[in-house]
Amino acid sequence: MMRLTRSFLANLATLILCFILAVVIWVNAMQVEDPDLKRALQIPATFIGLPEDATRISPTDDNPSVLISFEGPTSVVSELSPDAFSAIIDLSEVPLGSEVSVPIEVQTTNTQVTLDDPIPNTITVRLEKLVTREIDVELEIRGEVARGHTMGEPLIDPPVISVTGTESEVDRLDFAQVTVFLNDDTQTRIESPQPLFYNRQGRVASVSGLQLSTDQVQVTIPINESADFANKVITADVVGQVAPGYRVLGVTIEPSSVLVTGRPTQLALPFRVQTEPIDITGLTETFQSQVSLVLPEGISLDSVSEITVTVQIEPFSSTKIYNQPIELLGVDDDLEVTVDPDTVRVVLFGPSPVLDTLTEQEVRVSLDLFGLEPGEYSLEPDVDVPDRGLELRSIQPSVIDVIITEPVTPTEDFSDIESLNLDVQQPPETGREGRTAVPTPSLLPTRFAWLPKLRPF
């Protein structure tokens, strides 16, 4: 039995040794075929575990870079990308208000590689507690309302601004201020200015990096008329008629209203503030004058000012038609010109008084023929009218047909009398009264129609 046991143990030891030798041989073979390779990559780190009531002051970079190195079989290492690794910075146990070093933990999804410590392997972090505080909004008013008006209690919406940030940044703020500028305002003023924040030393403070509940504040400043003052619109008392053919385009008053004073009961009643009568009889152009005002009894102006009235006057406009002959300009004496048609229809628009006095001789229609050779042309006529505010509405026809020819020169060769187709041997025909009928030029060929009348041989 002992011999059998010893034999089994010897065989087991031999078997284990053979297995170890096989593994060593396999590892050596793999090292030859797929040797280990070491590489380095730069990857971004990610912060996790930030408490809800805290904010990170440093580092300011949300994803600081770290350098990692890893080793493994060449076939595995060569295929790995930065996405196979992650660098984690856990902030869940970091105390608030002080700088501490936090380790950077690198992880990978591949188990065939080994990782070295990253560079850097720690990072300095500072966390601060987040607080929210309501800051009062104060209003600064510069300028004044108009005379005769009073300013009511301003309304600020919202009256406070909630500011969220680090405790040190929020605690240094004292108040917020908005400014509204008045310039003799007569009506309620509504504005939305941007507030400025001030620290406890009275200086303007930056709120960059802080979270604000609003960055604008609406300010309403009520403005009302005083009981013994009233602002009244001025109306112009225009009398008379302008010259025939003219009209009043409009009346402007500068200033358009005035501030009057009187008893509140009287000011509460409706009344008009008019100018003194402005006579425009026979006027033909815009008229401007300084006038006085007519006020009801017991009502007076708060301050004396110049009142200027402008009455805009313009003529009525109409149209007028002229049938004008065409004047030929630049015609060569050696050429003959034929135009079709020889008159045109001109339509003018403008002030009626000007058209009523405009004569046909002042409306000229011409064709520019300077430098034209014999031939046929289609030309646009030129219309010339006095510069009195008139507008050319149309000209018909808009194009004139022009034929320029050379005059026909009479021939001097009359040797071929027979070509005239006159039978000179034919005895003259005697009329009823015994008079001899003479051939007339109408018997001549058309091409000789220009010859003088011939006497019989």
Image (cartoon, grey):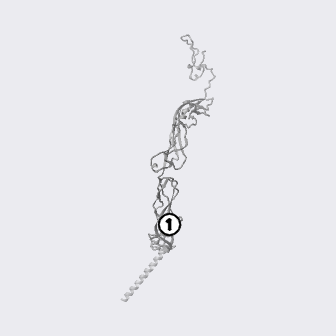
Residue 19, how many percent across, how many down? 43, 80
Residue most extreme to the top: 434
- Total labels drawn: 1
Closer to the camera in the image, 268 or 19: 268
Q: In this view, does 60 lie above or below 21?
A: above
Residue 29, how many percent across, how many down? 47, 75
- Asked whether residue 85 appears in the rendered view, the answer is no
Q: In this view, does 42 lie to the left or right of 406?
A: left
Which quarter of the image is occupied by the N terminus?
A: bottom left
Determine whether the residue tagged by mark 1 lies in a helix, strand or loop.
Answer: strand
Which quarter of the image is occupied by the C terminus?
A: top right
- Amino acid type, callout 1: Asp
Q: Name the residue under label 1.
A: 174
Residue most extreme to the front: 298
Closer to the camera in the image, 290 or 303: 303
Residue most extreme to the left: 1
Q: In this view, does 323 lie above or below 33?
A: above
Q: Is residue 300 above or below residue 451?
A: below
Residue most extreme to the bottom: 2
* Mark 1 neighbour class, 10 Å CA radius: few under 14, some 14 to 19, many 20 or more: some
- Asked whether residue 93 appears in the rendered view, the answer is yes
> Residue drawn at (37%, 87%), measured in percent from left and top?
5
Residue 118, how many percent across, how many down? 50, 73
Residue 252, how many percent across, how many down? 52, 44
> Residue drawn at (48%, 76%), measured in percent from left and top?
28
Closer to the camera in the image, 84 or 333: 333
